[in-house]
Amino acid sequence: MNEIKKLIDGFSRFRAQHYEGNGAAFKRLVHHGQAPKIMVIACCDSRVDPAIITDCDPGDLFVVRNVANLMPPCETTGHYHGTSAALEFAVRFLEVRHVIVLGHTGCGGIRALLQGVSGKDDLGQFIKPWMEIAAAARTKALAETKTKQSTDVERACEQAAIQVSLTNLLSFPWVRERVEKQQLALHGWYFDLENGELRRYNPANNNFDSLAAVPVNHTV
Ligand SMILES: [Zn+2]
């Protein structure tokens, strides 16, 4: 049970930091509610927690995480649209100013999209249809990656999937309206785990540039 003990010990430190001593900021959040300015759509991958890698505090980020950090298109069917619900809450209720789609290298979801989920019986029954959101990214990566090395195709697909999600964000009318009025900015970020770099999609050159090289206030 050492795995769980780590969490319990961690909560003790969190409690000491935010409820005792210098805990005024967190208490304010508790009593007055959250007002984050940034929503992040991140992957479930345990290595890419957005608050940890950006060293943010409680109240800074409104986060939804799903397999491969995908934003589905706007659909009004009666299904369980968890990510769309999070987006609606962030944009229409919290009125965040930024939405960041945060992808990363070595994404297992993207690998499943490219290689398929092989296994017995119903293995992958939820992952497969979910990853089809990024089918266009797979097509693009396979067509445009010259080397055909599997890692190169994966990197290209991870980045193309971020672009698909940015496009899908604009299929929500209340997102598009706010982007056009410059009340909301959309960002595509890519965390390179191997090199410890954060890259940002630059629509001017269609590349993922090092974070410092792209103006902060761009939108797609
Ligand atoms: Zn991932």
Image: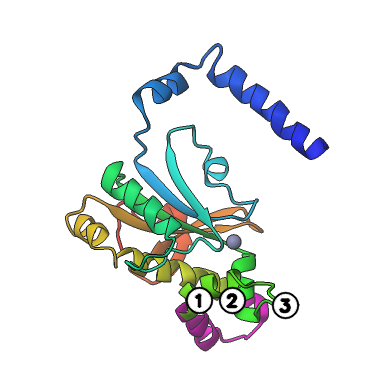
Q: Position of residue 86 (x, y in %)?
A: 40, 51
Picture layout, residue 23 above or below residue 108: above
**Residue 73 location, quadrant:** bottom left
Q: Which residues are magenta?
A: 136-153
Camera-nearest label, 1 or 3: 3
- Which residue is nearer to you in this view: 195 or 220? 220
Q: Which mark is residue 52?
A: none
Q: Amino acid at mark 2?
A: Leu
Label 1 C-beta lies within 8 Å of the nearest ligand 1 atom: no
In percent of the image, x 66 and y 82: which residue is there? Answer: 149
Compare marks 2 and 1 and give the one earlier in the sequence.
2
Q: In terms of image quarters, where does ligand 1 lie?
A: bottom right
Disc 1: which residue: 132
Q: Position of residue 7 (x, y in %)?
A: 70, 33
Does the stretch in magenta take in 143?
yes
Is the residue under label 1 in contact with that under label 2 (CB below 8 Å)?
Answer: yes
Q: Amino acid at mark 3?
A: Asp
Q: How is the image coloured?
A: rainbow
- How far is disc 3 from disc 2 in space, using C-alphas? 18 Å
Outermost residue to the front: 78
